[in-house]
Amino acid sequence: MSQHLQHDVLVIGSGAAGLTLALTLPDNLRIAVLSKGELANGSTYWAQGGVAAVLDHSDTIDSHVDDTLNAGAGLCREDAVRFTVEHSREAIQWLIEQGVPFTRDDGDHEDGGFDFHLTREGGHSHRRIIHAADATGAAIFNTLLERTRQRSNVELLEQRAAVDLITERKLGREGRRCLGAYVLNRMTGEVDTHHARFVILATGGAAKVYLYTSNPDGACGDGIAMAWRAGCRVGNLEFNQFHPTCLYHPQAKSFLITEALRGEGALLRLPNGERFMPRFDPREELAPRDIVARAIDHEMKRLGIDCVYLDISHKPAEFVKNHFPTVYQRCLEFGIDITQQPIPVVPAAHYTCGGVVVDQAGRSDVEGLYAIGETSFTGLHGANRMASNSLLECFVYARSAAADIVANLHRVTMPTDLPSWDASQVTDSDEDVIIAHNWDELRRFMWDYVGIVRTTKRLQRAQHRVRLLLDEIDEFYSNYKVSRDLIELRNLAQVAELMILSAMERKESRGLHYTLDYPDLLPEALDTILQPANADD
């Protein structure tokens, strides 16, 4: 039997943003944090590099703001950038207070300087990346998870896949508030009805829409698709960041080689040992990710090679092992000793810069519905996310959303009389091969037609294919019981269409969106905002 559950706050997603929000809210609220698989399946756990913040006495807020604006290719919203950077130090202090074991600096800090090791990554003019060796995400996630488990008012619910949001409009009622969500309990096979005063989408990005990605399997754009169907605007979904350096090995699934290697002097080389980044940008290996990814893509296509090489073997072996133990051990598993030989790497889809349009409190267009982390579009990243700003955004906006929820608690009562999920007209599927086939087709044509380099004709082909897929998926969804695979395919196809529409609207090349048909910048930088048919005017 399906259940009706009540929470003051329903958090969909168990990564850095979701856990931070849950921990920041008062302990007298009933909070549920949903994970559609195991709790550690999100992108946070696998983040290697660190968190960007103004921490060193030689760094300034203005410098971090300027670097972010430059990386964003003229499209960042300066108020969002400044808001994020101005709150960076207090966010890091909060993480330290939670017990995150950031790497200490061995240097002498008798002058009262910051005693944690800071590294530098692409686009940054200063060392401002605080990290826990090269496994920062795991250190942050494990710490926040342990803290959350100590909170008796927070329920951590695994194997729960959100199907759709429940809104007053969908129920034919007056108003536009979000009232909760329908959630597939994968352990019972039933769709439960979750009532909530506030709902937070913290479901991550949509990089799984591409054939090659550094993201875990769950990065399917669930929150973006659900928000769109609920009537929320989305912004800048044409900007998908491809991480320049993922390990190229047939057995190495989605293993990212942190940008911090290049921050510590690693060089990109062709198979013959020749460096190529000096030909593309004066910042060489420390150029922003879009430039590095396009340079690698160009060289691979020019030479017909399967990969390029990232070389840090010129650094002392002990330095490499101490600073990058995770990368060292993982590569060693595949027979690559990075202290002695270069690492074969390729670009892979890594980060969704656009998402659900929100304000500085994380509020979406639908009352009571918030989006934080990679699900959201705050304006911080512009046309290209600067390295390690994404985790910072998670903490700053989660804490801001929590403060807004607390300020509005007195206005919102628990929604009642929500209808149960109706599964009376559907049957068990005996054709799940259709889901697998559509999944593979979608990811392949998105890689081929909406990848690092685009053309109008490629986008038109992708648009034609995604519309056919959406029709097939809708028919399947209407006739068969929901499963996690079907939910993810439905959401991924919806977000793919939004990405294609956004890319077709941008008649220029800017940041991560590069098209051969419009290679130049337009004189004015404008966001691409899409509005669903069911949104308020």
Image (spheres, helix red, strand yellow):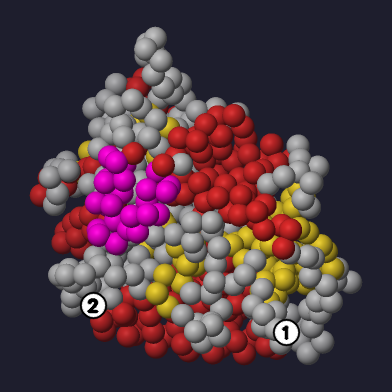
Q: CA distance from mark 1 to mark 2?
A: 40 Å
Residue drawn at x 37%, y 51% is 81
- On screen, residue 146 versus residue 48, left or right, reads right
| Residue 525 visible in the current orientation | yes
Around disc 1, counting alpha carbons within 10 Å, would you say few (fewer than 14), some (14 to 19), or many (20 or more)? few
> Of all residues shown, which one is farthest toward the right?
1
Q: Which residues are magenta?
A: 62-85
**What SS does tag 2 mark?**
loop
Residue drawn at x 44%, y 59% is 378
Q: What mark, if any, has residue 507 been given in the picture?
A: 2
- Magenta stretch contains residue 489: no
Around disc 2, counting alpha carbons within 10 Å, would you say few (fewer than 14), some (14 to 19), or many (20 or more)? some
The image quadrant that residue 497 belongs to is bottom left
**Foreground residue, 204 or 233?**
233
**Foreground residue, 265 or 422?**
422
**Foreground residue, 490 or 122?**
122
Mark 1 or mark 2: name the one nearer the start of the chain.
1
The image quadrant that residue 410 belongs to is bottom right
The percent coordinates of residue 328 (x first, y second) are 41, 32
**In this picture, is 100 found above or below 208?**
above
| Identity, as a three-letter code, of the amino acid under mark 1 | Arg
The percent coordinates of residue 259 (x first, y second) are 34, 42
**What SS does tag 1 mark?**
loop
Residue drawn at x 55%, y 63% is 363
**In this picture, is 117 found above or below 355?**
above
**Foreground residue, 411 or 464?**
411
The percent coordinates of residue 90 (x first, y second) are 50, 36
- On screen, residue 351 versus residue 423, left or right, reads left
Determine which residue is flagged by label 1.
173
| Identity, as a three-letter code, of the amino acid under mark 2 | Lys
